[in-house]
Amino acid sequence: MKCLGVALILVLMATPLAAAPVDIQGVRIWPAPDNTRLVLDLSGPVQYQLTQQAGRIEIQISDARLLNPLPAYDNKKSLFSKIESLPALDGATLTLQIKPGVEAKSFTLKPYEQYGHRLVVDLYPAAAVKASVEQPREAKPAVPLRDVVVAIDAGHGGEDPGAHGKRGTQEKTITLAIARKLAAIINKERGMKAVLTRDGDYYVSLRGRIHKAREHKADLFVSVHADAFLKPEARGSSVFTLSQRGASNEAARWLAERENAADLVGGVSLDDKDDLLASVLLDLSQTATIEASHDVASNVLAELDGVGDLHKSDVQQAGFVVLKSPDVPSILVETAFISNPREEQKLRDASHQEKLAQAVMKGVREYFIRKAPPGTVLAEEAQRRRSGIQVHYQNSSARRL
């Protein structure tokens, strides 16, 4: 009898318990101008299958259950017209009625900071529809000159809030506010034009930000951020450019992919160049770009010194992905420490945001006054100023004679 009891216990111990289903705690929808992101917040890792048919996407999630109703959404801004949950015996199934010419990509994310497990589904137009991208301008006979284009990148966005302060201020909110103010100031300046890598609370990948700047044929890329540190005493602004190590890593990446790309370096394609020539061209482009970036960064840092404290008195270098465009001078501005209560309060203040934007603009304008790209309104005005000085000297000499 005892043997039977022991055997029964062993059988029970050897029999695996049925795993509890994973909870789909919520669904978040982030519409952007050129894509729509769905994020499913999960209580644990999942197995899923995504299938796409004409006008329809089905997401089957094994051993899962939807806890809350699906959120409301604006189908005019999203790339799907309807989302619903269908009953399933062995899990949960979500279906999307997608708009014509839409494709999906999906992946899972492990827990990070305040987020748990997530399933992400990104919807994109299948064709390269770039409604928000500026098309090449047709030169008008009367006005063949173009504006200097500054791409302004509001750091983070959507499900990526960035750093946060003790009062709950999110970096993504502050960076967008400052970026919009900077864009407005630039657009009021003759001969200059601003474009935003994001103009709302949605996610844009790091390389997607670079891609948008290059699509707009930007002459400068400015990424706006708010720093954070474990100790609340850390304070002040910083300006970063790309490090040499970051440039070397990026060069290897561009060279490895050059056969699938075009117009990588200042309008010159590398796909038909041998390794040595491609490497030399890329090195020349990167060197000039880094030098220009440092020039702009020095101007901006000097102007920020008049607005508040500086965390570092010199331009810093790092391997940030958003700084890695080989042919667009790029800087990253850490406006202040959001983890510092005093600076967090300033960052929340609209008038201080305006001062920061004005300081960045002054630094950028000073650079372009000296080194405006050929064929731009600013370059033409600089040439006229130089010509005016020469004429003045000639006239003065004539009067003395």
Image: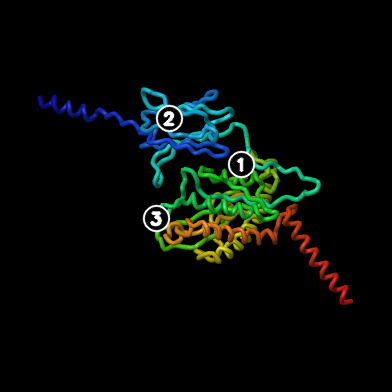
Q: Amino acid at mark 2?
A: Tyr
Res. 48 mark = 2
For the N terminus, the quadrant is top left
Residue at horizontal 49 percent and vertical 28 percent from the top = 82
Name which of mark 3 and mark 1 comes first in the sequence: 3
State how far apart marks 3 and 1 are (Cα).
43 Å
Residue 380 percent location from the top left of the image: 76, 56
Q: Nearer the viewer, residue 178 or 309?
A: 178
SS at circle 1:
loop
Residue at horizontal 56 percent and vertical 28 percent from the top = 99
What residue is shown with label 3? 166
Q: Residues within 10 Å of mark 3 (few under 14, many from 20)?
A: few
- Residue 305 higher or lower than 81, as above or below: below
Residue 375 percent location from the top left of the image: 75, 52
Name which of mark 2 and mark 1 comes first in the sequence: 2
Q: Nearer the viewer, residue 400 or 298?
A: 400
Q: Of discs 3 and 2, which sits in the foreground?
A: 3
Q: Of discs 2 and 1, which sits in the foreground?
A: 2
Q: Amino acid at mark 3?
A: Lys
The colour mode here is rainbow
**Left of 257 or right of it: where is 78?**
left
State how far apart marks 3 and 2 are (Cα).
37 Å
The reply to whether residue 328 is in sight is no
- Residue 284 higher or lower than 216, as above or below: below
Q: Of discs 3 and 1, which sits in the foreground?
A: 3
Res. 257 mark = 1
Single out the residue that lies furthest toward the right. 401
SS at circle 2:
strand
**Left of 71 or right of it: where is 284?**
right
Q: Amino acid at mark 1?
A: Glu
Residue 394, located in which quarter of the rendered image? bottom right
State how far apart marks 2 and 1 are (Cα).
31 Å
